[in-house]
Amino acid sequence: MDTAFRKIDIDVYDEDVLQEEELFDADPRDPNQVLDDAKQRQGAVRSALARSDVVGALNIVLENAPYGPNVEEAKTVTLQTLLTILNTTKSTEIPAVIKELSQDGQDTLMKYLYKGMAMPGWGDISGSVLLGWHEKLTEVAGTGCIVRTMTDRRTV
Amino acid sequence: MAPEVFNLAQTPITCHAFSADHKQVAVSLNSNDAQIFTRQGAAWTSTETLSEHDKLITSIDWAPNSNRIVTASQDRNAYVWQQTPDPETGKLIWKPTLVLLRINRAATHVRWSPKEDKFAVASGARAIAICSFDPENNWWVSKLLKKPIRSTVLSVDWHPNNVLLAAGSADMKARVFSAYIKEVDDKPTATVWGSKLPFNTICGEYASPAGGWVHAVGFSPSGDVLAFASHDSSISIVYPGGPTIYNIRISSLPFVTLTWTAEDTIVAAGHDCQPVVFSGSESGWQGVGSLDDSTSAKAAGTRAGFGGNSSVGRLNSAAFSTFRDADTRGQSGAGGTTDTKLLTVHQNTITSVRPYQSSGGRVVKVSTSGVDGNLVIWDADNVSAVAGRMGGMRM
């Protein structure tokens, strides 16, 4: 039986189709401003890490994280900044750090962990570090946190 | 009191609706026939089959006063069933009346209005059909609520004033509409949702911060508060006057159904396989506990899954431990670890939670049906403390 018809994208023939951007509220900030913010945070995170304030560093990078279209560069910068924090934190400190984060912070962190795991070999991503954080974060925030990462269309 | 558990079938129960006297229950066993089970002592036996649909029945509602059943199906039809004497034998049989829904996608959910003179059918056609009876032609006619729905409507719930309707949709929004039908309704009085209410007035549109399909909606008994559960594992409570929305994120899998048991209490259930109780007021809401008491004997001797203090029902099973032991200790599945039963009463997703019995203005018992083929009647006040299995549940 011919099954090729199953792969036809019928949505292109629908004038009233639901667009991806309608599914979430757009970031009110200008893309350039988002990028500037992301770059400024790199410095703030570095100084927080120098004081070995991991929670502070994570809060800086996770708050108002860039999402949505047109901010790809800011997203990359933010991921890079976050990876520095994740890679330099001792695994024994992780549970305490995660407990200090707000619910929003935990949900955003989970988004970045999944983003990182989807890009193996990129930059200084280490699968074992990400999995270590993932395990500890799931213990604290539960599977609900993972469900929110998969559901939320405000992708980081 | 322990919950009453009845296994009706080995197939999923898509939805259930009790008759007013609780002696009968109409269920869809994941098929195109609605089955009516009658209670005989401690057991339920299938006594009648309502066959008319030719695709899966998605939702059933049984009007308590007029004793009419409405069924909605993926075949894009709804039928109203009424008991009428058979002209030859005089025996009471359920007779279907077709409803002109005018939708071109599956009907997903159906509910009678409080006065039972209208019902609302949610559908995949980005529309809600508000149906009322046309005595001249002896059929049910519909008027469609369309704007501004952008995707499949998954659930509906009526306001006690018989006019306002809440709807949850796959476009991530919960909405409150006016479903005022001139021929049926008296002019509604003003509520917190608005005063001028012609048909298809949008009285409110709400979303959860992380989005997600809105699986379930429900008005509080007074109708002044709206609750909805969405696929981002959260439940939101809306006070329109505020305007305040309380969003409670849970640490386990999403809810797909909810019901208010009092002005300050909600029971929600879903993929986590247990009914969870939330309580609060205009000043704040929180999770209280589960109706599923995990401290009973069956939970004893089972190791907690996933890191030691997790509360996740599905993962808290022996099957999980088997794999973990194989991973961490190199033990293979010998020695009684083949038990795959969950610690919860329901062994799979709960598809529907509904009020079962009221006393003094409060719902004292709720009923749930699940993908495991079980129908369970719970004591709504018997909430086991957060400390138990809910220990890890972050509210």
Image (tube, rainbow, N blue to C red):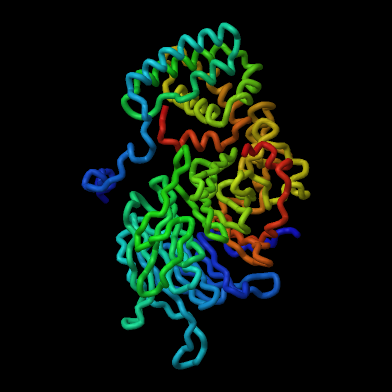
Up-down relation of residue B302 to residue A34 (above or below): below
Q: Residue at x 30, y 60 (%)?
A: B104
Q: Position of residue B94 (x, y in %)?
A: 47, 80
Depth check, front residue: B212 or B321: B212
Quadrant position of residue B3: bottom right
Q: Is residue B38 left or right of residue A148?
A: right
Q: Is residue B31 visible?
A: no
Q: Residue at x 60, y 63 (%)?
A: B355
Which quadrant holds the C terminus of chain B? top right
Q: Position of residue B277 (x, y in %)?
A: 64, 50
Q: Position of residue B157 (x, y in %)?
A: 48, 60
Up-down relation of residue B23 to residue B164 (above or below): below
Q: Is residue B189 left or right of residue B5?
A: left
Q: Position of residue A144 (x, y in %)?
A: 55, 38
Which quadrant holds the N terminus of chain B? bottom right
Q: Is residue B35 visible?
A: yes
Depth check, front residue: A14 or B313: A14
Q: Is residue B155 left or right of residue B392?
A: left
